[in-house]
Amino acid sequence: MNETLGFAHFLEHTDAVARGVLAVLLLGSVVSWYLIVTKGIGLMRASRQSQRFLKVFWDAPNLEAVASELRSTGTPEPFSHLLHHGFTAVDHLSRRAGAPSLVDAGAPDEMLTRALRRAIEEDKARLEFGQTFLATVASSAPFVGLLGTVWGIYHALMAIGLSGQSSLDKVAGPVGEALIMTGIGLAVAIPAAIAYNSFARATRNTLTQLNSFAYDVHNFLATGIKGSPLRDDARATSDKVITLARASGVGVGMGAAAAGAV
């Protein structure tokens, strides 16, 4: 009888509940590994792009050079996305005319602050995508596996009781097979927990750097919008920047949404 014991033998004698538990664990594992691979690659790529953009930004002689970098950026990463929202807010402020509306409510620097904060919230939502699922799998998979183990032990003991054979070798095999479910639950939960902690730490670090960068961008752009009205040279610079950024097609949809929501 010992030769027939194993995971395959366990699967042959499982019912719909045990197979449903296995299906849930398999689904959680597949989705978790998909998120681990895709988010891991995405975070590494975004980190390299951010370092490159920040170097170009701080070494740039003027805003036109920064706008050229935005134009050459294929996929906006958090820092270039933030700066694009800032440029869009400055563009809106430089072009508003007529009676004030709700869009124009508040001082110019307050409108710029709202635009930058909106960009940070959008990046935060994008960075945290999938982390809730990983946390759910990490916290629930062991208990789902334990449920399958308890259910398997129950059926094993029922079968042993009906057979009238209660020796150790008759009990240990079926109970040991049922414990496989707990092992599967742990195998699903451990990678999800490690990935969640790693991604959460990377997200916190990115948001910390993004908030610091937003403070610098706000001070940098606010020098051209404080007072009434904008200076001619600041307006001309803003127009050139927005024209170059829009011509690239990078983040136009996000920029337009920011301009309409500011």
Image (cartoon, rainbow, N blue to C red):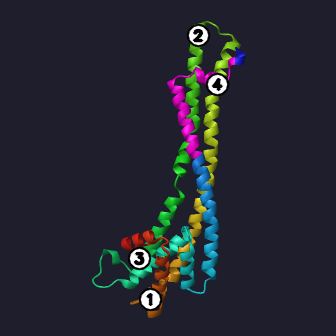
Left or right: 198 with respect to 70? right
Q: Position of residue 122 (x, y in %)?
A: 47, 64
Q: Nearer the viewer, mark 1 or mark 2?
A: 1
The amino acid type found where label 3 is placed reads Met
Depth check: 215 or 130 in front? 130
Q: Nearer the viewer, mark 4 or mark 3?
A: 4
* Residue on which the image places disc 4: 8
* Residue on which the image places disc 3: 111
How many C-alpha atoms fall within 10 Å of the one at disc 3: few (<14), some, or many (≥20)? many
Place residue 169 in its image quadrant.
Answer: top right
Write the residue at 56% across / 34% down.
Answer: 143
Q: Secondary structure at mark 2?
A: helix
Magenta range is 4-32
Image position of 188 with respect to 115: above or below: above
The amino acid type found where label 2 is placed reads Gly
Do labels 1 and 3 touch, CB within 8 Å? no
Q: Quadrant of the C terminus?
A: bottom left
Q: Position of residue 39 (x, y in %)?
A: 59, 55
Q: Earlier in the sequence, mark 1 or mark 2?
A: 2
* Residue on which the image places disc 1: 235
Write the residue at 31% across / 74% down.
Answer: 102
How many C-alpha atoms fall within 10 Å of the one at disc 2: few (<14), some, or many (≥20)? few
Determine the CA span between mark 2 and mark 4.
23 Å
Determine the CA span between mark 1 and mark 2.
87 Å
* Residue on which the image places disc 2: 161
Q: Secondary structure at mark 4?
A: helix
The amino acid type found where label 1 is placed reads Arg
Determine the CA span between mark 4 and mark 1.
73 Å
